[in-house]
Image (cartoon, grey):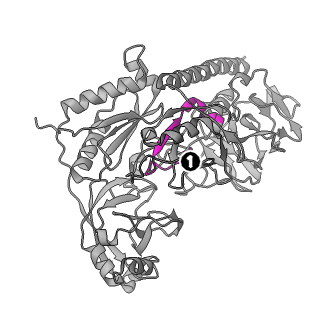
């Protein structure tokens, strides 16, 4: 049984938490932009957090379910509806056979995650479901979803009985405390290896001024506009390691934040790094929004990340427990 | 046992999930060999919590899982500190000397202006004739220092000063197989992509085959020689 795409979106792809272990060959990790929302969506439907899901931008695809399914939508709020009736976000929702899921308006955020119980049955490439659009591989045929695509779903438990005559049924638990929001006013960073090469004036500007996300921003990177920054001496840098969240200084004095589809290495000064616990905040930003950076200690960044992971883990235990009770009673 | 003695290095975080060991902002064959030796060693003996290691020209970056690193180290210590100490210890003790097999790979290139879109401009800027640019480019055996940018894209060096033109100001569409020059580096685009390197020719070699066993044609450490072929030979292949 399939999930059929009945209307294409602008840039909807199958993703998971990324493809690790192949950066030495130039193959980037990719994966979800908002990793927290991806984890939460999968957990709500009883999947492992690294199961395949669909990452959507607005306007998003519309889907037709050829079988009943348990779904969850997290991340951005695109006014998700089933057969015309709005469904709650961050809730497990049962949808009946022949239902249509669509997204009717952009309320807040940039990227929504749609997870389905059992995941999406597409082949893995190098241990990951993530779509590498540039290399045309991974995910669904190595490309964004289009109208008439048929995404194979795995066999679902007998949801018919639970649904009864309902077209959909929101299950009575949710994950609102793990809601990710676009928050630009306070993005925590730790200084990067080339931080000390910035002029004193530029260091001040970086931490005091605000920077605006330009329309050139995408899954590869965010281009920021703001007062130009400069180095103490302009020294050519050879390519070296980068990661999701690396803030590089371009030769024209502007900044770029590397996002999920970033290159494996880079040759521009790495002046700072957005802490991992704040990746979801920036993943939900829109062009035109202004960011402010605040410096924090390495230990704070690690603690925030561990705290986030432990909340996700608790949610996973709770959801699995509730779901098992529901399905096996 | 003979061990590698590492040169002076800097060690620093790349955010909260990666750590880099950097042997200086230089392109040097010996240092690069040591980086690759360290990479091979870490592949066989991964540090606790390590996700992957990524070698570059003169540095190596190790991506890690904070929780797993922390579980393996003393309480109250950050994952970064735990890994920094382990890496320092490893670099102090040295690692067994590696003797990687040397591969010399010949790459047929058609330097026809229909592929080498930037040859004419390069000739104008440098005052060197197109034929001589080709002669200079094919006269050197290059080393693959690292892979990055695109799947299978190799950074090779070092290009003769006379034809070492900087990247173009505005990236343009570059076709798969195109050979480019950026400063003292030369490389081949495995996929069609926007790119800023000066394009001088094209090869028929397929550098990235996602479904093959050997997905990527080149390995860091390989030596590469470019062989000039005619347009006829190029189309026949």
Query: Where does the image place residue B54, in percent across and percent down from the top left?
Result: 38, 43
Give the tally of numbered discs. 1
Q: Residue at x 65, y 40 (%)?
A: A210
The quadrant the N terminus of chain B occupies is: top left
Q: Nearer the viewer, residue A204 or A193?
A: A204
Query: Where does the image place residue B5, in percent across and percent down from the top left?
Result: 17, 38
Q: Quadrant of residue A147?
A: bottom right
Residue B84 vs residue A253: left or right? left
Query: Where does the image place residue A218, in percent across and percent down from the top left?
Result: 63, 50
Q: Quadrant of residue B204?
A: bottom left
Residue, disc 1: A255
Q: Quadrant of residue A76?
A: top right
Any magenta on residue B26?
no
Query: Where does the image place residue A194, in percent across and percent down from the top left?
Result: 43, 41
Q: Nearer the viewer, residue A226 or A199?
A: A199
Which contiguous range is marked in magenta?
A256-281
Q: Nearer the viewer, residue A273 or A115?
A: A273
Decide if residue A278 is in sight here. Answer: yes
Identify the residue at the far bottom of this view: B232
SS class of the residue under badge 1? Answer: strand
């Amino acid at each position: 049984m399939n999930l059929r795409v009945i209307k294409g979106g602008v840039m909807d792809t199958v993703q998971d938490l990324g493809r690790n272990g192949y950066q030495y060959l130039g193959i980037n990790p990719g994966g979800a932009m908002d990793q927290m929302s991806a984890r939460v969506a999968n957990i709500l439907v009883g999947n492992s957090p690294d199961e395949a899901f669909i990452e959507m931008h607005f306007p998003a695809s519309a889907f037709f379910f050829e079988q009943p399914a348990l779904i969850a939508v997290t991340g951005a709020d695109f006014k998700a509806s089933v057969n015309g009736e709005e469904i709650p976000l961050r809730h497990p929702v049962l949808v009946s056979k022949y239902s249509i899921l669509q997204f009717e308006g952009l309320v807040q955020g940039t990227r929504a995650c749609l997870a389905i119980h059992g995941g999406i049955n597409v082949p893995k490439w190098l241990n990951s479901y993530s779509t590498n659009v540039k290399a045309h591989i991974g995910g669904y045929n190595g490309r964004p979803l289009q109208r008439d695509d048929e995404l194979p779903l795995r066999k679902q438990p007998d949801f018919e009985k639970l649904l009864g005559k309902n077209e959909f049924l929101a299950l009575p638990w949710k994950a609102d405390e793990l809601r990710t929001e676009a928050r630009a006013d306070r993005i925590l960073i730790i200084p990067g290896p080339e931080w000390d090469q910035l002029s004193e004036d530029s260091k001040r500007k970086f931490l005091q001024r605000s920077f605006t996300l330009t329309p050139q921003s995408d899954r590869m990177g965010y281009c920021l506009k703001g007062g130009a920054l400069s180095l103490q001496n302009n020294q050519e840098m050879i390519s070296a390691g980068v990661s999701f969240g690396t803030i590089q200084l371009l030769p024209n004095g502007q900044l770029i934040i590397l996002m999920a589809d970033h290159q494996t290495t880079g040759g521009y000064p790495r002046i700072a790094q957005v802490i991992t616990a704040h990746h979801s905040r920036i993943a939900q930003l829109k062009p035109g929004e202004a960011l402010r950076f605040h410096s924090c200690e390495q230990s704070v960044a690690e603690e925030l990340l561990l705290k986030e992971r432990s909340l996700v883990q608790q949610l996973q235990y709770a959801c699995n427990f509730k779901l098992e009770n529901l399905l096996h009673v | 046992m003979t061990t590698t003695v590492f040169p002076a290095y800097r060690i620093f975080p790349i955010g909260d999930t990666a750590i880099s060991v950097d042997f200086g902002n230089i392109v040097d064959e010996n240092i690069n060999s040591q980086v690759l030796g360290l990479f091979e060693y870490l592949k066989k003996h991964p540090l606790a919590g390590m996700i992957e290691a990524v070698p570059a020209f003169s540095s190596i970056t190790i991506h890690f899982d904070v929780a797993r690193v922390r579980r393996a180290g003393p309480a109250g210590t950050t994952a970064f500190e735990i890994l920094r100490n382990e890496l320092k210890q490893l670099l102090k003790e040295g690692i067994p000397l590696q003797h990687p097999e040397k591969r010399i790979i010949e790459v047929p290139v058609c330097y026809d202006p229909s592929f080498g879109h930037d040859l004419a401009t390069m000739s104008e800027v440098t005052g060197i004739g197109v034929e001589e640019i080709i002669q200079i480019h094919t006269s050197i055996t290059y080393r693959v220092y690292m892979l990055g940018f695109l799947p299978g894209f190799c950074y090779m060096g070092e290009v003769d000063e006379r034809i070492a033109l900087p990247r173009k100001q505005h990236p343009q569409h570059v076709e798969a197989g195109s050979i480019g020059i950026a400063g003292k580096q030369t490389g081949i685009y495995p996929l069609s992509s926007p790119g800023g390197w000066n394009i001088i020719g094209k090869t028929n070699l397929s550098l990235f085959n996602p479904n093959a066993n050997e997905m990527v044609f080149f390995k860091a450490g390989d030596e590469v020689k470019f062989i000039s072929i005619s347009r006829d030979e190029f189309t026949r292949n």
